[in-house]
Image (cartoon, rainbow, N blue to C red):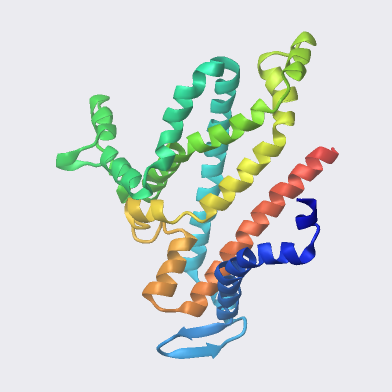
């Protein structure tokens, strides 16, 4: 085995097919999209080099900036909810339910495997009004209130979208954080208890610092996933009412594939990529400062 992996030619031959596929399906499309962001037009009209005009247009485009705000707000709120509730569930699995948490872990994780469109239709039926009124409005009516058309307002649609995202992905983050908590040695926790730490003090001073790496990974993973939200907001209310809940990904899709503005669509994709990079570096930088402090 050492002879095989000590030979550079053998390593190159083994890696070449994977590298070729990666370059062909990952690097080339990204480079192609980056190049398109400096052009205007499509395959029918032809392409014209416009330099940085697409970037200038983006920062003066009201619809693009509105979609950018929707993406950022959705990512921040969804990440806070996913990681917070996921961490609380993970603590519940480890310190309360222990070995008996297998069924609950499976039940909470199950929505993660459901198709997003099916989940969106389910939540639409929950908040529907009229002849097919859903259980949410039935409860509001039973409490003496009037039915609420959640899908008719921006805040209502965003609230339903966040609830849907939390319900479907919270189990994934709970399992991810649960594996991190299992790596904390029992001896360390017992030592903390012997020193008088219990309850919130134990979690704050021992559990959270020791599970910080997996916690930061979860935050970065959630931010990058929710910044690229697309199908849930599209299936829930088609980015409406109007375009008030259209995220940047949906605006990019419509620009590139409905209006055939490939150059401007590529510029939006590049802005979204840079946004994910900025969020990731910000989390890394803040975590490094925390460790140094």
From the top left corner, tell me how far across and down residue 125 is, in percent. 26, 41
From the top left corner, tell me how far across and down residue 261 is, in percent. 45, 79
Rendering quarter of residue 182: top right
From the top left corner, tell me how far across and down residue 94 is, in percent. 59, 21
From the top left corner, tell me how far across and down residue 183 is, in percent. 69, 28
The residue depicted at 65 percent of the width and 53 percent of the height is 279
Question: Which residue occupies the foreground of this view, 261 or 33?
Answer: 33
Count of numbered badges drawn on the protein: 0
Question: Which residue occupies the foreground of this view, 87 or 161?
Answer: 87
Asked whether residue 59 is in view, the answer is no
The residue depicted at 43 percent of the width and 86 percent of the height is 43
Question: Which residue occupies the foreground of this view, 128 or 257?
Answer: 257
Residue extending furthest left?
A: 131
Q: Is residue 109 above or below residue 100?
A: below
Q: In this view, does 163 lie above or below 3?
A: above
Residue extending furthest right?
A: 292
The residue depicted at 44 percent of the width and 23 percent of the height is 103
Image-based side of 12 in relation to 161, left or right: right
Is the C terminus in the top left, top right, bottom left or bottom right quadrant?
Answer: top right
């Amino acid at each position: 085995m050492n002879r095989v992996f000590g030979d550079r030619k053998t390593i190159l031959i083994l890696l070449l097919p994977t590298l070729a596929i990666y370059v062909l399906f990952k690097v080339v499309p990204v480079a192609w999209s980056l190049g398109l962001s400096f052009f205007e037009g499509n395959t029918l009209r032809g392409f014209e080099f416009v330099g940085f005009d697409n970037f200038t247009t983006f920062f003066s485009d009201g619809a693009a900036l509105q979609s950018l705000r929707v993406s950022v707000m959705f990512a921040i709120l969804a990440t806070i909810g996913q990681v917070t509730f996921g961490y609380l569930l993970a603590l519940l699995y480890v310190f309360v339910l222990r070995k008996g948490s297998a069924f609950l872990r499976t039940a909470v994780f199950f929505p993660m495997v459901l198709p997003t469109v099916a989940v969106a239709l389910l939540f639409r039926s929950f908040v529907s009004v009229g002849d097919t009124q859903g259980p949410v409005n039935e409860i509001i009516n039973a409490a003496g209130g009037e039915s609420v058309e959640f899908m008719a307002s921006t805040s209502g649609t965003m609230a339903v979208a966040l609830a849907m995202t939390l319900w479907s992905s919270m189990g994934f983050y709970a399992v991810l954080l649960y594996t991190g908590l299992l790596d904390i040695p029992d001896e360390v926790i017992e030592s903390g208890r012997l020193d008088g730490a219990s309850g919130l003090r134990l979690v704050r001073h021992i559990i959270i610092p020791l599970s910080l790496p997996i916690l930061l990974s979860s935050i970065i993973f959630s931010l990058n996933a929710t910044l690229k939200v697309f199908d849930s907001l599209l299936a829930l209310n088609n980015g409406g009412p109007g375009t008030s809940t259209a995220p940047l990904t949906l605006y990019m899709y419509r620009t590139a594939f409905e209006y055939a503005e490939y150059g401007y669509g590529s510029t939006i994709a590049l802005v979204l990529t840079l946004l994910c990079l900025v969020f990731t570096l910000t989390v890394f930088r803040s975590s490094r400062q925390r460790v140094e402090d």
